[in-house]
Amino acid sequence: MIAERAYCKSEKRGFVAGHEMEDWLEAEWEIKNQYFYWFQDVE
């Protein structure tokens, strides 16, 4: 999931080199944040 999200970010930028780590870390944060909200207990 992270790789796919990072790929989409790179694609959106036109595959300009030099942003690979930024794309990966941003995608990783988005996925982790998404799962955090999905699995919170709702009372």
Image (cartoon, rainbow, N blue to C red):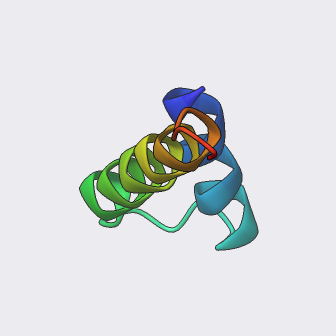
Of 37 and 32, nearer the camera is: 37
**Which residue is found at the position 39% from the left and 44% from the top?**
28
Residue 6: percent from left, percent from top: 54, 46
Residue at x-position 35% and y-position 53%: 20
Closer to the camera in the image, 15 or 22? 22
Where does residue 27 sit, x and y in percent of width and height? 47, 51
Left or right: 39 with respect to 29? right
Q: Position of residue 29 (x, y in %)?
A: 37, 54
Q: Position of residue 36 (x, y in %)?
A: 46, 43
Looking at this view, name the residue that lies furthest to the bottom. 13
Query: Which residue is depicted at the point 35% across and 65% down?
Result: 19
Q: Quadrant of the N terminus?
A: top right
- In the displayed structure, 25 sits above or below 41; it is below
> 33 or 28, which is in the foreground?
33
* Above or below 9: residue 1: above
Image height of 10 relative to 35, above or below? below
**Left or right: 3 as drawn, with respect to 43:** left
Q: Answer with left or right where residue 24 lies relative to residue 34.
A: left
